[in-house]
Amino acid sequence: MQKNPHALKVKLILWLIAALTMLSGTTIAASLPGISAHFVPVGGDNEIISRLILTIPALTIAIVAPLAGWVIHHFGKIKPIYFSLVLYAVAGCSGLFADSIVALLIGRVGLGVAVAVLMTAGTTLVGDYYEGVERDRFISKQSAFVTLGGVFFLVGGGLLADFSWRAPFGVYFVSLLFIPLTAIALFEPTKSRADPNQNASLFGKGGYFDALPAFAVAFFTMAIFYIVPTQLPFVVESMNGDGIDAGIVMGIGPLFAAISALSYANLRKRFSLKEIYLAICLLQGAGLGIVGLASEVWQLYAPFVLVGLGNGLAMGNTSAWFLELAAPQKRAKLSGILTGSFFLGQFCSPLFVHPFLRFMQLHYVFSLFGGFLLIAAFVLALNCVKAKLRYATAQKLGGG
């Protein structure tokens, strides 16, 4: 008997799988100093080692995700999810036992492979299970769930790191608990199996070229998003703030991102995807732009409220746009490319910032990127006005 995709247990496991993608990066952030002290000899390049530990999963996901899309397209979504949940636990927990930095990095690569499959399969199932308003509601709640999960994992990882730098790696075992719920709730959609166009070209209607704008936006969305966790602590430090100050400022964004994410479905009833992107660019652009004017830590609170509100809408809007563009029979392969685009943006984010540091202080770089977003908002505003004028003209001519 076909399972009901609208059941709470189905939505819950899809939300939990999505949260694992956030858990993969945030949990061990507080362990990095301990990892460097344990594995890197005095005088060694701690910064490079720490950066590799954080970025290798993202780079792995960017490379593997398109291949994961191909595997899911041909072998279904559920079996790869089982495999990835096990791999996630084994590779993620390798830090509990790793006796060398090489072993630790290999574990992080395995974790990246697991996340690539989970995120690709999850996105594909959302597109298969839900349509229209129901899909927007699901994406809205999923974005909030993942955002709040990121805060929980970040704080939890910090508390565990106080006991031992290895302790946060044990959290990755949680993926094994999701296997029974996956078996109970998830199912292969019969419509995709029966689709006569299952093997249609990836480059035809509803294929790669149609979805290319969404891939580009996904890349830049994540590149902008990751400027905050990778660069903000240094801005706080330059203002004589400490780790607690950085944690408070960084926590403001996810809190307000969860609030805006929950409003996404209602916004989609009133505004187009393009109009929501306009709001995102205005919020993030204004928030990042104000950072360059701040001279004390408390002055960062308000701008990161704005940035958080924009972040809460950004990934959900991109996912909703992609699912509208991608043809159902090509969704799995294209979802792999979308996943790769998100995580390639995450990997490249520090690379975008670094060249500007030769010419300006870091907090001014935030303002520079804010300026780019405000320019994008201006272009989108013009485009929205033109679209409304064309619509009004067409209505007037039709009425006449």
Image (cartoon, rainbow, N blue to C red):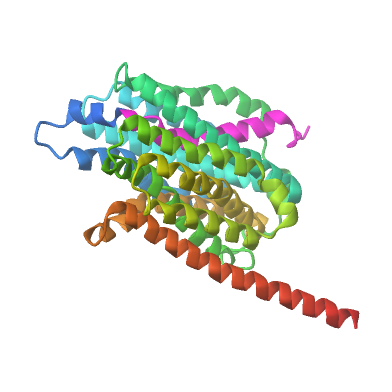
In the rendered structure, the answer to whether residue 156 lies left or right of residue 385 reads: left
Residue 336, horizontal then vertical, whole percent: 51, 51
Residue sitting nearer the eye, 44 or 293: 293
Where, by quadrant of the figure, is residue 158 drawn? top left
Residue 373, horizontal then vertical, whole percent: 47, 62
In the rendered structure, the answer to whether residue 224 lies left or right of residue 187 reads: left
230 w.r.t. 388: above or below: above
Residue sitting nearer the eye, 346 or 305: 305
The image shows a total of numbered marks equal to 0
Quarter of the image where the N terminus is located: top right
Residue, far right: 400
Where, by quadrant of the figure, is residue 382 drawn? bottom right
Residue 164 visible in the snapshot: yes
119 w.r.t. 284: above or below: above
Q: Is residue 7 magenta?
A: yes
314 w.r.t. 211: above or below: above
Residue sitting nearer the eye, 349 or 336: 349
Residue 311, horizontal then vertical, whole percent: 52, 48
Residue 81 visible in the snapshot: no
Quarter of the image where the C terminus is located: bottom right
Residue in the picture at 32% in, 31% down: 243
Span highlighted in magenta in the image: 1-30
Residue in the picture at 56% in, 25% down: 178
Residue sitting nearer the eye, 159 or 65: 159
Residue, far left: 43
In the rendered structure, the answer to whether residue 397 lies left or right of residue 131 reads: right
Prevailing secondary structure class for the magenta stretch in the rendered image: helix
